[in-house]
Image (cartoon, helix red, strand yellow):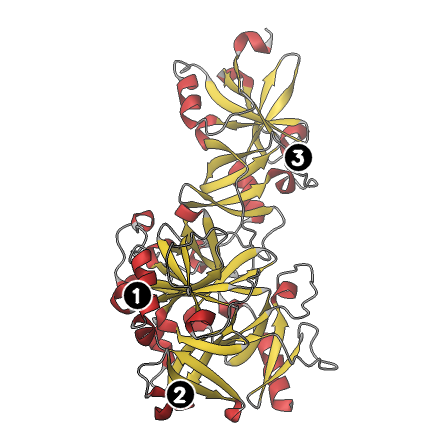
Amino acid sequence: MPMRSRMQRLELGAEMGAPGMAMAESAEGMDEFRPFLTFLVRDETFALPLEEVREVIRLPEIATVPLAPASLRGIANLRGAVLPVADLRRLLRWDAAAPTEATRVLVVVAGSVFGLVVDRIGALLAVPPERIEVAREADAAADARVASGVIRGAGEAPVPILDSAGLLRRDFTRPRAAHASSAAGGAAPAAPPVDAWLGEDRRVLVSVFSNGQEYALPIEAVEEVVPMPDQVTAMPHADGRIIGVADQRRRLLPLVSLRALLGWAEAERDDGNRVAVVRLEGGALLGLVVDRSGEILRVPESHLHQVPSLLTRGGKLEIGSICRLDEGRRLVSVLSPENLFRHDTVREAVAAGDGGEEPELSQYGSGAAERDMEEFVVFRLAGEEYGVPIGKVDEVLLLEGLTRVPKAPAFLEGILNLRGAVLPVLDLRRRFALPPVDRTGQGRIIVHTVDGVRTGFIVDSIAQVLRVPATAVEPAPDLSQAEAPLVSRVVNLPAEGRLVLVLDVARLLDREETGELADLGEAR
């Protein structure tokens, strides 16, 4: 009997978006049949049992994961959940292809929830049991495709039933106990609070530049440092130092020019301008517009000095102290958020905003208390955003003064003289097998201590200091093969459609490399 006479066939439209409900309704009344969804990859047809397909979506925006298997496209945000997305072509060991309008992602349940990129959707089939056969080793149509069986029909080629779980296990195998969330199933350890790593005699400052001068703000007062917003609404009759207000994470953020606030002439703004979002007294937020961002400095308290009394006779200054670095060759003025708030211009700007109300935290779960917040230094590399817990960052430096070392290890980019100590420097692009770029006048160095060795890692740019509720941070999906993962957690911000991959700093170097770097420092 012809296959079509024994099998109900429901064609799916090309604009199929999320057909979970539609597919369930179509399968009603078919108890005597088993429903399958067919799809095409490189003009070959495959099938999946309908119960394994949670939904079908268009190709979402994807964040790539460094050093992941070639078959992994990356991870995406699916309505607040982190979704790993694999390319079925690569899983089948075929060449990848550029996505088209017909490209779709099957959200499947294969042990865990995974996304599979396919070329296009085929049809819904209601198949009688006698047309379903278990895969045989001699059946090339099934064996070569990691199939659990085939759908057969007279006059038609057999359709392999994809074993999605088995196929994914070939590239993504790692015991869950090896995950950052411990074998007992506990949550990944939270980054230590700021007070735990400052120490009694250390202060952490975020430096910025205005009119060629370097200033700094206490890290505890800085919510984040972000690019200048594209859309800024000017305030009528406002003080000339008030630039306007902008929408920042669902709140109105007042923007004040640090140049003008300090009495400097305004300059034309460009792509280098940044906004330091500062929390003032009473919780109000203010955006200080600066020429460019600088470094994250971790300095001893002894390096901070009071402003000379002669300069404070006229009242409170915006500058709270002077930081003396490099044996006095570098002086950084530390701004005082308390004194900034006393400035009439700042009060006017805060009144023009919305009072610095926090965005709703319901997107992260229940409301987050202050103790339940985590902070990350977010940087960019090849267009992707990565983060490291702020407690793992010793400091952030400008990329300058790098010296090449003859006969040094191949992975070493060079060394820096950091206050009399040798600092080995590596390029994270090379670490992550990313294409090199010309870094003339660009880039930053994030300094970490890995296995007792202080090491600098070059990144493209520093994006911000990001402060989020702990409920917005979740373990990364199990994606790695034999090696432990570089990405340990993910900051998931569904309201912004944003994922920040959190790196495990301890995995940036292996033991052999840390040994070579330690030997290099001793030799120098």
Q: Earlier in the sequence, mark 1 or mark 2?
A: 2
In-front residue for pair 276/27: 276
Distance of label 3 from label 1 (alpha carbons): 70 Å
Q: Which residue is drawn at 34% across and 59% down?
A: 470
Q: Which mark is residue 304?
A: 2
Relative to 454, residue 293 above or below: above
Relative to 81, residue 326 above or below: below
Q: In which quarter of the image is the N terminus?
A: top right
- Amino acid carrying label 2: it is Leu
- Whether residue 165 sits left or right of residue 233 in the image: it is right
- Amino acid carrying label 3: it is Ala
Q: In which quarter of the image is the C terminus?
A: bottom right
Q: Where is residue 232 in the image (x, y as percent from the top left)?
A: 45, 53
Q: Position of residue 390 (x, y in %)?
A: 42, 70
- Residue found farthest to the right: 406
Name the secondary structure under disc 1: helix
Q: Which residue was labeled with disc 3?
A: 144
Q: Where is residue 463 in the image (x, y as percent from the top left)?
A: 50, 62
Relative to 505, residue 13 above or below: above
Q: Residue 347 carries which label?
A: 1
Distance of label 3 from label 2 (alpha carbons): 68 Å
- Are discs 3 and 1 less than 8 Å apart at CB? no
